Image (cartoon, rainbow, N blue to C red):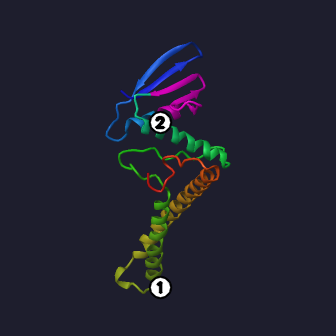
Amino acid sequence: MPGIRTFTVTPERAEYFRRFDGTSTWPPHSQAIRFLYSAKATRSAVVGEFDFPEGRMRVEGFDAEHVGRIGDWFRILELGREVGYANPPKPAIETTSNRGFSSPVLPFVFLAVFCVPVIAVTLLSLAGALPSLGGSWIAGVCILPIVAVGLVLSGRRLRWYSRVRARVAETGERMPHGLGLVD
């Protein structure tokens, strides 16, 4: 059974085991990541072990691939700090709906491409070139701010993503799971 064994040192010595069964949305390794992050855990020198303010935690019952994914998630946070982010964005946590794709490239490209026809329809409608569409410019005026905010936010995440990937290439280490274009 996959879970995390916690060894506390303060305020008193104790040992606990937290089991993760998985749900229809969150696989067990994603639940473990959320649990470790909420405990302010950081990677230790031993694979599958994490330090946290009150002691240490050990990932148990997961196969090697999932132990690696858990460690990679925290490595990406470390890389974000290495490239200059005091509070780096959290990497995507795998759910059943986003399994295999965590890259910010696709959302940015989708929004950029979507923006072009919205602007074109809005401008053509305002110029009277699309009289049959009537008030289609209203939809464009309403949608454009939402698309603009999405572009800015996904652009910021894409910048972080590019800087972290460049840092991995610079150090020559293996690309952590979650930084590939498709994982």
Find residue 105 and report its horizontal and vertical position in percent.
Answer: 49, 60
Relative to 8, is 136 on the left or the right?
left
- Seen in the picture, residue 168 relative to 127 is either above or below; the reply is above
* Residue 127, disc: 1
Front position in the image: 174 or 112: 174
How many residues crowd mark 2 within 10 Å: few (<14), some (14–19), many (20+)? some
How many residues crowd mark 1 within 10 Å: few (<14), some (14–19), many (20+)? few
Find residue 156 and report its horizontal and vertical position in percent.
Answer: 58, 57
Find residue 96 and report its horizontal and vertical position in percent.
Answer: 35, 45
Front position in the image: 170 or 40: 170
Q: Residue furthest left?
A: 24
Residue tagged 2: 34
Q: Quadrant of the N terminus?
A: top left
Q: Which residue is drawn at 48% across and 65% down?
A: 109
Q: Distance between the residues labelled 1 and 2?
A: 51 Å
Front position in the image: 151 or 133: 151
* Residue 159, disc: none
Q: Do the residues labelled 1 and 2 touch (CB within 8 Å)?
A: no
Q: Quarter of the image holding residue 18?
A: top left
Q: Which residue is drawn at 47% across and 57% down?
A: 181
Q: Does the magenta stretch include residue 36?
A: yes
Q: Is residue 100 magenta?
A: no
- Magenta residue span: 34-59
Find residue 102 and report its horizontal and vertical position in percent.
Answer: 46, 52
